[in-house]
Each structure stands twice: as C-alpha cells, then as structure tokens.
Amino acid sequence: MKKALNLKTFFNIKLNKNDINLYLSFFLYSLIPSIWILVRTILLQNIWMFH
C-alpha cells in the first residue's frame, strides 16, 4: 500500500516538473519575438542617429 502511494506521488512530482518545463519553454518562446522587435528598434534608432 505504502509503495503504491510513493509511486503515485513520484509520478505526480514528475508530471508537475514536466508541466513547469513546458510552461517555461512556452513563456520563453512567447517572449522571443517581443525581445527581437525591441532590439531591432533600438538598433534601427542607433543606425539613424549615426547616419
């Protein structure tokens, strides 16, 4: 009985860890375009200033 319970909690922890990784990767992927746009605008402004 106790062994089954431990196994269940182990699987729950594993699933939670996978969910956290999934959410983190999704969050990063959703951030990348906005960061790229920000960097691009800053670079374009700097280029306009220098020329």
Image (cartoon, grey):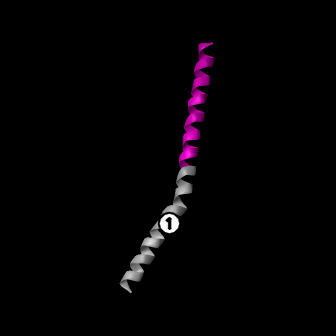
Looking at the picture, which amino acid does disc 1 mark?
Answer: Trp
Question: Does the magenta run of residues contain 3?
Answer: yes
| Residue 7 in the image, given as x and y percentages of width and height | 60, 23
| Residue 48 in the image, given as x and y percentages of width and height | 41, 82
Question: Does the magenta run of residues contain 23?
Answer: yes
Q: In which image quadrant can residue 33 be found?
A: bottom right
| Residue 13 in the image, given as x and y percentages of width and height | 56, 30
Q: Does 33 sit above or below residue 42?
A: above
Local SS, label 1: helix
| Residue 49 in the image, given as x and y percentages of width and height | 37, 81
Q: Residue furthest left?
A: 50
Q: Main secondary structure of the magenta part?
A: helix
Q: Residue at x 58, y 24 (%)?
A: 9
Viewer-proximal residue, 27 or 9?
A: 27
Q: In which image quadrant can residue 46 be found?
A: bottom left
Query: Which quadrant: the N terminus?
Result: top right
Viewer-proximal residue, 36 or 25?
A: 36
Query: Which quadrant: the C terminus?
Result: bottom left
Q: Does 47 sit above or below residue 25?
A: below
Q: Does 6 sit above or below residue 36?
A: above
Q: Residue at x 55, y 43 (%)?
A: 21
Q: Residues within 10 Å of mark 1 (few under 14, many from 20)?
A: few
In magenta, the rendered stretch is: 1-25
**Residue highlighted by disc 1:** 36
Q: Residue at x 57, y 27 (%)?
A: 10
